[in-house]
Image: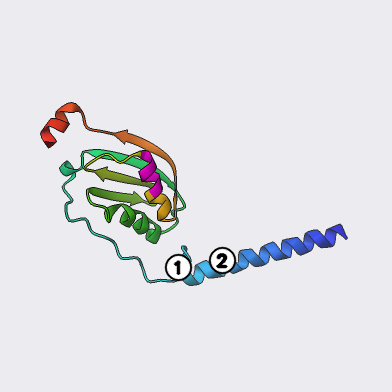
Amino acid sequence: MATFLIFALLVILAGFALHSTRKRMRLGCCGSGEAPVKKIKVHDRDMAHYPYVETLLIDGMTCHNCVIHIENAFNRLDGILAKASLDTRTATVHMRQPLPEKDLRRIVSEAGYTVMRIIGNHTPSGDQLNNIN
């Protein structure tokens, strides 16, 4: 009897796995079924205007659409220019004004992903700050 229950459980799990695989193959890795995500373009791409930089290690990015979702979450905000990388599973966020860690995590979370850790906390030196103002 125990063997039958284990076998039945394995069949059910295999069914869920097959269903999930078919869904991803049909709808894309994010399962959204939508057309490719349109990228939000930042008008000011001059990196000298963004003295604060944070690099976030992000969990959950699996495709190009995921990268665009994360970039868009930041780039729709004024004073931020973000670039995500699927290869390194990171997002580099350039900011005119520093954002608290909790806000960075919230933005990524609202996009549907998780910040595993903040790799870099790069702020300009006093000389660089004087040149900005």
Q: Left or right: 77 with respect to 57? A: left
Residue density around tag 2, few if under 14, some if 14–19, many if 20 or more, within 10 Å: some
Q: Main secondary structure of the magenta part?
A: helix
Q: Quadrant of the N terminus?
A: bottom right
- For residue 95, above or below residue 43: above
Task: Count the labels in the image.
Answer: 2
Q: Residue 70 or 133: which is nearer the viewer?
A: 133
Q: Residue at left 62%, top 63%?
A: 17
Query: Residue 1 got which mark?
Result: none
Residue 14 in sight in this render: yes
Residue 60 at what x, y percent from top left? 47, 52
- For residue 33, above or below residue 118: below
Q: What kind of residue is marked 1?
A: Ser
Which secondary structure lies at badge 2? helix
Residue density around tag 1, few if under 14, some if 14–19, many if 20 or more, within 10 Å: few
Which residue lies most toward the top here?
126
Residue 105 quadrant: top left
Residue 51 at what x, y percent from top left? 21, 38
Which one is in front in this view, the residue at disc 2 or the one at disc 1?
1
Q: Residue at left 39%, top 41%?
A: 102
Residue 87 in sight in this render: no
- For residue 48, above or below residue 31: above
Say whether residue 65 is magenta: no
Residue 98 at what x, y percent from top left? 27, 39
What residue sits right under mark 2 in the picture? 21
Mark 2 vs 1: CB contact within 8 A: no
> Magenta span covers which residues?
101-106
Q: What kind of residue is marked 2?
A: Thr
What residue sits right under mark 1 in the picture? 32
